[in-house]
Amino acid sequence: MLEFRQVEMVFRSGRSRKKAVYALRSVSLRLEEQEIFGLMGESGSGKSTLGRIALGLLAPSAGEICWDGTCWTRSMPKKVRLAIQGIFQNPYGAFNPRHKLAYALAEPLLKHRLVRSKEEREAAVRVMLRRVNIDEGCLDKYPSQLSGGQVQRLALARILLMQPRLIVADEPTTMLDLSIQAQVIRLLQTVQQETKTALLFISHDVPVVTALARRAGIMYGGRLVEVGLVDELIAQPRHPYTQVFLAAAREQTVPELQQGEQKEGCPYVVNCRQAGAECLSYAPPLRPVSGEHYVACYWAGQCK
Amino acid sequence: MSALLQIERLSVTYNLNGRALPALQEVDLCLAPGEKLGLVGESGAGKTTLASAVMGLLPRGATVKGAILFKGQTLSSPLLARLRGREMVLIPQNVYNSLNPVFSIGQQMEDLLVKAQLPRQKRQQLILELLGKVRLPRPQELPGSYPHQLSGGMKQRILLAMGLSRSPSLVLADEPTKGLDPVRRMGILRLVKELVSRNGQSLILITHDLKAAVYLCDTVALMYRGELVEIIPASCLLTAGLHPYTRALLAAAPERGLAIPACGEGPPSPAAVQGCPYSLVCPICLPACRKKKPPLFSVGPGHMVRCGKVA
Amino acid sequence: MHKLTFRAAALLLGLLVIIALLGPLLTPHDPFSQNLDLRLAPPSGKYWLGTDELGRCIYTRLLLGTRYSLLIGVVVVTVNALIGTLLGLFIGYGPKGMDSAVMGIIDILMAFPGMILTLAVAGILGPGLLNMIVALTLLGWVNYARFVRGMVLSLKEEEYVENARMLGLGQATILFKHILPNCLGSLLVYASMNMAGVILMAAGLSFLGLGIQEPYPEWGAMLNKGKNFLRAAPHLAIFPGLAIMLTTLAFNLLGDGLRDRLQGEGEVFLIKSEKG
């Protein structure tokens, strides 16, 4: 359905734009219809950048994004824009603090003429509120008058009204309390089952991704280093970074990672114990190890 | 053994535009020297208020009742001014605003050490030593750099180094792992554990990360809407938590099935509840719980629960 | 304390507006009728604030003067704010090339000493109400444009603006429905402060004979006349001076009060979002 083809993203800054930060490097990934894909990685690994590119909020420096056979680099076709919607880390950020929620929820419906009449619009909003389990009285309030969990559910309600075919959820629960987190994730789960929307779930919370996703990918240093079915990935991580990442999530002692300034080659090379000469000069591409399991390491599977 | 920190019937009430907002209610806590206590609860549970009360950093409008004793002495503002930064330190949650952007790291760290009356040479040596201790890469380059040149993780470690520079006997860490990815989270947890246990310092870890509290602490205190609901040895928390709220939090973890806990939403109601604060949403609430707040029952060694049903 | 000054300012301004609207009903005298027998009379039961050098009632003339000052203030500030805000919105949100070009022009305009330019324009156009308004709007919008542009630049990075883009809302909707409402508060504060400045400036121009002139009772013009009789009849200068001072003070306090109030709102919002 959605496909990234060798997507690159370079942020330039500083005098005469000389300082370049490579946020994404040659990322290729295909999301299947109706699937929940978990994207994990440390902060700065490029996972949010990929999400923002999927949403059309950022244009990649190179590569293509394809949706049902239509491909683009710079500007996302309007039709696709409505089909891909997202929720983000800070629930309050989703809403303009000066708008009441009734308006905030109805605005996209109005602007895109997705409903024919006022009655239809109000009915749609009401149905959606029931679905995300929010009291109708909230419509008359400002976002700041509600709790973070409520606002996050309303943000979800607003994008669901657009009937998206893919939802990008960029760390939607990191800022929420444990109990609220469970609510939001459960809701995402049910909504996904009911509407059959695909979900790109970006998070560094391994247990959450495990509970939610079918497939998952791990990013490091702007590259996708491993992709596979979640269960396989957890049981048999192949990439040395994935191994460290998953071990840390289980409170096991892991080595501290150095920040590498790697232009070419594997991004993990400074921390890797098995790195050889080829790792320094050429970044390993994603290669299949078994079935749906891909890993970007020359040595994966050969060592302990 | 005498307690390092003793909190007796501490109540804090904020004043918000003339409305009284109870934040802490009759909290009793005792911290032995070298003990590591995890203070766990959700937003609005009062854990940050408790830390601020200990540090004497409550906002002006707050009313405080009860007593806080540090090494047997009641904390008063002149005493606090002497203790803060020396005997007890707070590692703040917001790493981004906690370093002054116009001074270099070296200058800011030196300012802390000036009062220790060390010669300049010695001070700089100490700074490098501290930066090395928190395992920052290339520590010799850091004193000359400014906060904006550093990543959030580095700033956090620098704040940790600054906090520990005067070897305090009590360290309060406010959500040190919030929003960190697993590798960085583990790095910080390990670092804090090592540093604190090496010097036998006491630690109060404020967090809502249950597993971090279990990893780092000896005892975990769970708070709900300004009250302590359970105090439990950390090693028992994941298996033997008794209070319905504790159990609800545990069951909400993704590994345990993401059960949606009954917690009540939104800010706590300012109207003081007569009975148990959890009785409004408690699945196993007894009629008596609504009328009278149950006391903290002792249910095992180092394990206390404020619940009329399970005790 | 803050609330009190804000209320005092609001009260005073309300009073001024009522005076401006109902002026003639509040006095038994005519602002233009001369009474040469009663020249330079001190305040009395009949003439509350005394009479001027032509025997006209100063109280009545001050009442009428309120109209001029407020009219000029409101018109000039509205025109400046409208032009400046629209321009600021477009250059802040539009393509970068346009932004640099317009900002270049604005920087050049700002480099002129505004007071002198206004004086020169007023001098060239000649005295009169309309000419004064033109002179005051010629450069007045520049600050608004800069101010709004700055706000737009930061607001367009806000997450809710990004969300609006994600929802596929049009540029105009984003600009006028999402960005503009969040500028309005600060704009209001700025405008009320600016109002004080404009009224003072207008009085200054009239004082110098470049604005509204005799026989019309503009406060600045009255002050100018009064300065000639400072020894013999100080009330000629004191009362218009007081009127100018009180009006500008009221607008400044209003601005301060509005700012405090808006910041208060912002704080409430912040506290809430941290709780999330």
Image: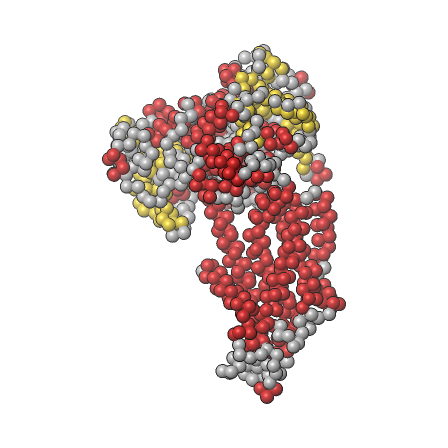
> Is the N terminus of chain C in the top left, top right, bottom left or bottom right quadrant?
bottom left
> Residue B244: where, in percent of width, then height?
33, 29
Q: Residue at x 57, y 21 (%)?
A: A33
> Residue A304: where, in percent of width, then height?
54, 12
Asked whether the viewer can see residue A68, the reply is: yes
> Residue B250: where, in percent of width, then height?
38, 27
> Residue C143: where, in percent of width, then height?
65, 55
Q: Looking at this rendering, what residue extends furthest in the bottom direction?
A: C37
Q: Give the colouring mode of the picture.
A: secondary structure
- Left or right: A221 with respect to B51? right
Snapshot quadrant of residue A66: top right
Number of numbered discs:
0
Q: Residue at x 39, y 34 (%)?
A: B41
Is B217 located above or below residue B98 in the figure? above
Is B265 located above or below residue A210 in the figure? below
Q: Nearer the viewer, residue C234 or A157?
A: A157
Q: Looking at this rendering, what residue extends furthest in the left direction?
A: B288
Is B71 located above or below residue A191 in the figure? below
- Left or right: B245 with respect to A115? left
Q: Residue at x 70, y 50 (%)?
A: C103
Asked whether the viewer can see residue A149, the reply is: no
Q: Nearer the viewer, residue C88 or A242?
A: C88
Q: Looking at this rendering, what residue extends furthest in the right direction?
A: C124
Snapshot quadrant of residue B245: top left
Q: Residue at x 30, y 41 (%)?
A: B273
Q: Nearer the viewer, residue B2 or C2?
A: C2
